[in-house]
Amino acid sequence: MAPTTVFSLLTVLAVAPVLYAQQLPLQNFAAGPSVPRTPGRILVSGFGSNSVHAYRAWDGSPRRRASPVAGAQSIVLGADGLLYVCAEGIDQILRVDPETMSVLGPFVADDPLTPADENGPLNGPTSATFGPAGDLFVASFENDQVLRFDGQTGAYEGVFVAPGLGGLNGPDAGTKFGPDGLLYVPSFWNDRVLRYDSTGQFVDEFVAFREGNLRRPRDLVFHAGHWYVASSSTGRILRFDAAGNFIDNFATVNQPYSLAFHPMNQDLYVVSLSDNGVYRIDGRTGTVLAAAVTSGSGGLSGSVYVFFLP
Ligand SMILES: [Ca+2]
Ligand SMILES: [Ca+2]
C-alpha cells in the first residue's frame, strides 16, 4: 500500500469517525426486508454560492450541484418529482431535476418581454410550498406577504396573505402548512411565528413576540407532536407543543437557519449560516453529534436551507 493511500485512509477515518458509526446501523437497517432505504442525498441551499448543493447522506461527501440558482432558499419536492427552489435574488421559483441536478428553468418568473406581470408583486421569495389543494404558496420576504400560484402552470393567482396582515414582517424560508391545515409563517423581523387559515386570514400568533426568547426565526418543522423552531440570532432550537406553548431549548447551534429531521434515524439536521455547513443532532437528546456537511464542502457558501432527497 503506497504511503499516499495510507494517508488518505487515515484522513478519512480522522475526519469522519461518527460517519462510520452512522453508516453501520444504517446499513443493517437497510438490510431488513420491509424497511425503506435511507435517503440518498442531503440538499443544501447556498445563498452565496447561488447553488443547490447535493451531498451523499451517509458521509457528507459532495455530489453535483444545481447552478445557477441566484440566492437559493427553500427547496421542496413537487408531486411531479421535480424540485422547486426559491431563487431569492431574481424573484423566481426554479425547477430542478433531482437526479441530474440540472436547472430546468423558471416555474414562477416575470417575463420582461411581456407587459403582463407574471410573478405578481413577488419580491424576495424565501419559501415556496405546496398547499393541500396543490397550489404553490410563496413567501415574499421584502413586501411581507404570501402569494398564490397555480401549482401546475406557475401562473400568478393573487395575494394569499395580505401585506403585513397579523403583523407579518419578513416571512421567511420556513413558511409551510402544518398538520392542522394552517399556514405557519416565521416573521423574521419581529420575532414571532404567525398562523393563517386556508383562506389566508390571520388566525393567531402561534409563537408570541419573543416567547421562549425567540429571535429572528427562520425555519420550523413539526415532528412527533412538537414544533422545532430555529431562533437564528440566539443560536437555539426551541421546542413548542402543538398549541404553541414553549417547552424548552432543545439544542444549541450557531445561527441556525434551517432544520429537517432525517426520515429514517430521527436525528435533527440543522444548517448553520455562520458555520456554513450542516450539523447532525441527536433527535432525542438535542446533543450535537457531528458535522453532516463540513464547512464550505463542495464550494458551499452562505448555507441557508436543508432538504432530504429520498
Ligand atoms: Ca412580464
Ligand atoms: Ca412582478
Image: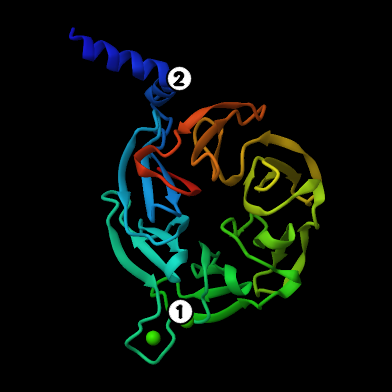
**Secondary element at image label 2:** helix
Where does residue 32 sit, x and y in percent of width and height?
A: 40, 23
Q: Could you tell me if residue 143 is visible in this image?
A: yes
- Label ID, residue 119: 1
Q: Residues within 10 Å of mark 2 (few under 14, many from 20)?
A: few
Q: Residue at x 55, y 43 (%)?
A: 274
Q: Nearer the viewer, residue 7 or 30?
A: 7
Where does residue 102 sit, x and y in percent of width and height?
A: 27, 56
Left or right of residue 225, residue 43 in this image? left
* Disc 2 residue lies near ligand 2 with CB under 8 A: no
Q: Residue at x 40, y 29 (%)?
A: 58
Amino acid type at circle 1 is Asn
Q: Residue at x 32, y 48 (%)?
A: 65
- Which residue is tagged 2? 25
Query: Tell me, what colour scheme is on the image?
Result: rainbow
Where does residue 229 sit, x and y in percent of width and height?
A: 67, 47
The extreme left residue here reads 2
Looking at the rendering, in which quadrant would you find the C terminus? top left
**Label located before the other in sequence (2 or 1):** 2
* Disc 1 residue lies near ligand 2 with CB under 8 A: yes
Amino acid type at circle 2 is Pro
Q: Could you tell me if residue 20 is visible in this image?
A: no
Looking at the rendering, in which quadrant would you find the N terminus? top left
Q: How far is the residue under mark 2 from the one under mark 1? A: 46 Å
